[in-house]
Image (cartoon, helix red, strand yellow):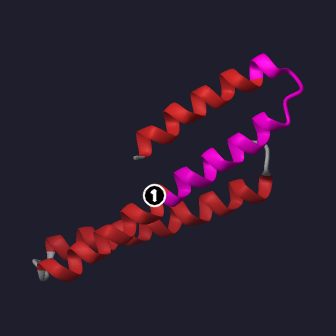
Amino acid sequence: MADVESNRAVANRLKRARGQLDAVIRMVEEGRECEPTVMQLAAVTKALDRAGYVLISSGLRECMDSPDEQQRAEAIQKLEKVFLSLA
């Protein structure tokens, strides 16, 4: 992914998710109630998914700029598989 701004956004999102995950671990270790713990875990999951989608989106933009139609088709096919792995 060549888009520096997208890279920065993804890295920031992942850092926030890491902080949220640390909070979930603390909640579990402290025996906190189920509902807020699961809600926090859902937030981590969503943050990770969004980071993956941003990476895929950036990859799609990059491969659409490829002048070679064969390479573009192969890249799109690979990205589709990656996208489906997040589903």
Region of the chain picked out in magenta, as a range: 50-71
Which residue occupies the foreground of this view, 47 or 22? 47
Placement of 50 over or under 64, stated as above or below? below
- The number of callouts visible is 1
Horizontal and vertical percent position of residue 34: 13, 77
Q: Which residue is mark 1?
A: 48
The single residue placed furthest to the top in the displayed view is 70
At a point 77% along the width and 59% down the height, the residue shown is 5
Q: Which three-letter amino acid code belongs to the residue tagged 1?
A: Leu
Is residue 33 left or right of 76 when viewed as pictured?
left
Is residue 78 left or right of 3 when viewed as pictured?
left
The single residue placed furthest to the right in the displayed view is 67
At a point 29% along the width and 68% down the height, the residue shown is 41
Placement of 57 over or under 47, stated as above or below? above
Q: Main secondary structure of the magenta part?
A: helix
At a point 42% along the width and 70% down the height, the residue shown is 19
At a point 37% along the width and 61% down the height, the residue shown is 45
Quarter assignment of residue 31: bottom left
Is residue 79 left or right of 5 when viewed as pictured?
left
Tell me, yes or no, whether the highlighted magenta stretch contains residue 66.
yes
| Quadrant in which the N terminus is drawn | top right
Quarter assignment of residue 40: bottom left
Quarter assignment of residue 71: top right
Horizontal and vertical percent position of residue 26: 24, 73
**Numbered disc 1: secondary structure:** helix
Placement of 73 over or under 46, stated as above or below? above
Disc 1: CA contacts within 10 A as few (<14), some (14-19) or many (>=20): some
Tell me, yes or no, whether the highlighted magenta stretch contains residue 55.
yes
Placement of 19 over or under 4, stated as above or below? below
Horizontal and vertical percent position of residue 84: 45, 39
